[in-house]
Amino acid sequence: MSQALDAFVSAYDRSFAYAYDNEIMLNWYPKRIIERVPAQGRLLELGIGHGFTTARFAQHFSHTMVVDGSAAVVARFRAEFPDCSAEVVEGYFEQFDTDEQFDVIVMGFVLEHVEDPDLVLRHFARFLAPGGRCFVAVPNGESMHRRLGHLAGLLDDVMSLGHGDVALGHLRQYSKDTLVAQLEAAGYAVRGVEGIFLKPFTTQQLQSLALPESITQALCELGISYPELSCALLAEAVIAP
């Protein structure tokens, strides 16, 4: 299983075709979480990915633990962020266990990868401390650029998996409605859903414009209020009473 996960590690390099999008989103959504949660808390993160988010969370929270099932991803993270204080647990989400409870659990771009998202959501609910909050980020299949591509005849179905999705090991797309429904079915109460990065055109088209950082940041700010059109979704949830 670890070798199967390792097969996707090249898609997390900066040479990846969609690294432009990833860098914007993975530097944006941790900021949104950090703005809402006190620094004294304990955070559990599922998946290392590019390592940006783990390194950022470890600088803010009193204790950060991250779980990842790919030995190659873990090794790359330790090489790129040797001074990161996060506790790294190498193992599969479904088998993870600890006596600790956490004030914050972050599932950043995880649910689109796993075989059984409902199982993962229910499994990690028991590690959430009373009053704790779970933040879930997923790609949005109904984003503005995918809708535009569909209308232009470039995409048969907005919810279909593209080349970038396949390269990253995605198994599904989400919409705002399907994300909320899945969280509620797993026993969570959704406090809100916001957008991550309102992306008006394809990655290649945006890169050709050589946009200044002020514009990309403005597109992230704009996306907060338009989750249905944004490149990705960020939900905040608690355990339902």
Image: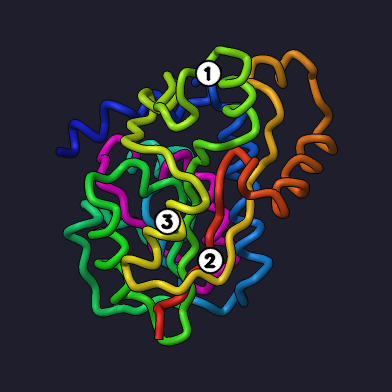
Residue sitting at 81 percent across and 25 percent down? 211
Magenta span includes 63: yes
Q: In the rendered image, which residue does mark 3 sit on?
A: 107
Q: What numbered label is drawn on residue 232?
A: none
Mark earlier in primary sequence (2, 1): 1
Q: Earlier in the sequence, mark 2 or mark 3?
A: 3
| Location of the C terminus (image quadrant) | bottom left
Query: In the drawing, does residue 19 fall left or right of residue 10?
Result: right
Residue appearing at x 76%, y 49% in the figure: 221
Question: Is 142 within the magenta?
Answer: no
Q: How does the figure colour the protein chain or chains?
A: rainbow
The reply to whether residue 54 is in sight is no
Instruction: Between residue 6 and residue 204, name the one nearer to us.
Output: 204
What kind of residue is marked 1? Ala
Frontmost residue, 102 versus 172? 172
Report the span colored magenta. Answer: 48-73
Residue at mark 2 to residue at mark 3: CA–CA distance: 10 Å
Report the side of 37 relative to 3 (left or right).
Answer: right
Q: For label 3, count other residues whose C-alpha is less than 10 Å away and answer few (under 14), some (14-19) or many (20+).
A: many
Q: Which residue is mark 2?
A: 236
CB contact under 8 Å: marks 3 and 1 = no
Label 3: element kind = strand
Q: Which mark is residue 17?
A: 1
Question: What residue type is disc 3 on?
Answer: Met
Q: Where is residue 101 drawn, in percent x and y?
A: 35, 79
Q: Is residue 131 above or below residue 107?
A: below
Report the front residue among 236 and 54: 236
